[in-house]
Image (cartoon, grey):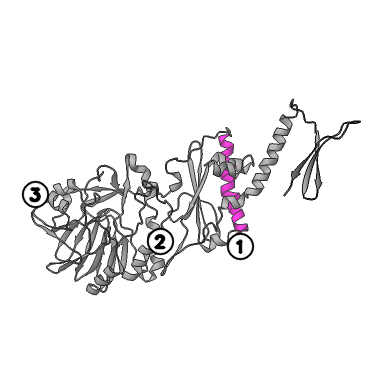
Amino acid sequence: MQIHMIGHASIFVETQDCKILMDPVLWDPHAEGIEDVCPKREVIHELLPEFDLLIISHHHLDHFDIRSLAYLPKTVDVLIPKDKLIETCLRKLGYSQIYHLSDFSEVKLGATSLLATRSENRVPEYGIVFADRSGVCWNQVDTAVSLDTISLVKSHYPQIDFLLAGWQPMLETNYHTNQSLSFPYSEYSQLLQLISFIKPKAIAPGANGFKFINGSSWLNQIVFPVTREQFCKDVKMVYPEIEENVFAFDPGDIIAFKNGEFSHLKEMCQFVKKVEDDRDSLAFSPINVGNNLIDDNPDNYNLDEMREAINEEVCLHLPKFIMEKKDSLFLDHCHWQVIYQLEIVFPDSRKQWFFDFSQDNIQAQAGRNPLANFFTCITASGLYGLLKQIKGWDYATQGGYGRSFKKIYIATKYGITKPRENSMADPLILKFPAKEIFESVRHREVEKWAQSNGNSSISHESKTVLMKLGNHLVRRWKEPNNSESKEVQQINVG
């Protein structure tokens, strides 16, 4: 069996005696102009092979694309869920051989068998199991899979050879509906646990290869909390028996398998080409939504001096500090294998470094790490103010110039475990302790303003004195020579 990745949820399946096109989206942009397939691809439409069967899993626009369906031949058999809208649109386009699938419907096409798998979502939809003599592939598409569904599928096919898995716990409308943008630990843990129950021989992250574009592009920083690299790593932790049979599946790739042997044929599809790996645009960063961090450099620090000082701190002093305190301040960071992503926003640019606490020698490494799980973003002027002890953490954090978030966990065969809330401090805060910086900045302010206000016209003559009597302070007016005592005023203390 061969599975061609056209892009996102669109696949072309070749069994021993059948060719099947599923959820075709053949042009970008799609979904009313708000989405592109990601990584970026080119579909060579005239080279699309003939096929025997068209499958539509459900009516969401990244699976049900009218333009693509209008382009395709209308004489093929079409399998759809029980969805009146899909059927009506297909008939208007000229399709006539349309068949509905219910939960666990079976289809026989010569030596090829299909099984429609149930979804717990409310929208009419299904996944599909493809089976022939070479093996079994389960494409879960967008379905919410239950343990009962897994049990029923495995009663038909005890061994799933290749799983196109649900993998991304999308925060699709969380921002719009005022819900949490925190990493969805519970939902992601459930997705990983399902894989350990299915026990496939090989796996690839399935449908979720798209990005938002144009005026919707800001959503890319809050909708996709898991990177593909992280998922592939986590699968091996949750289900180590899979070994190296975890494949990143790009547009233009083919996964071929027969009798338990797998080949990942990268960029070998003749009718789809990967143009660019633009997945960096999907970097999850909920701390930058709505008000992207910029550095106006309000104190007009010299940019060259600021850049030099920050590079020296990040590349030399901070790694040295981390290594010196590795077995004390950073014990938790090492235990949880933190990968600390630090982004500095300069007035004219941005720079990124990461620190991998799972390594013996922890150093600053330039760039973005897709496995990062502790993120700090701070303006260059905010960090420079800390370095020079001109401004403190109040300015950086309460002023919104320093921001951070975490998605720290360890994947195990029993699900995700994560540290206690707020158990790990930001390495920058450990390097520049808030209390010490606060005191230093206050002393600096005292020196500055004491000198500048020395010639103030305000009288500094003391006319009263406080006397402590037991648990009370009593204010007395100072008595001039040869004068009577003044009124006594009591002030309670403590």
Q: Is residue 201 left or right of residue 93?
A: right
Report the Cα–Cα distance between label 2 and label 1. 31 Å
Residue sitting nearer the eye, 484 or 197? 484
Q: Is residue 456 above or below residue 230?
A: above
Label number found at residue 186:
2
- The image quadrant that residue 329 belongs to is bottom right
- The image quadrant that residue 10 belongs to is bottom left
Residue identifier under label 3:
94
Q: Is residue 135 above or below residue 22?
A: below
Report the Cα–Cα distance between label 2 and label 3. 45 Å
319 magenta-colored? yes
Q: Could you say where residue 272 lies in the image, as x and y percent from the top left?
A: 23, 51
Q: Could you say where residue 279 lies in the image, as x and y percent from the top left?
A: 36, 49
Residue drawn at (31%, 52%), measured in percent from left and top?
Answer: 209
Residue sitting nearer the eye, 190 or 376? 190
Q: Main secondary structure of the magenta part?
A: helix
Q: Could you say where residue 151 lies in the image, as x and y percent from the top left?
A: 27, 72
Q: Residues within 10 Å of mark 1 (few under 14, many from 20)?
A: few
Q: Is residue 57 left or right of residue 483?
A: left
57 magenta-colored? no
Instruction: Give yes or no for contact between labels 2 and 3 (Cβ–Cβ under 8 Å).
Output: no
Residue identifier under label 1:
327
In magenta, the rendered stretch is 302-329
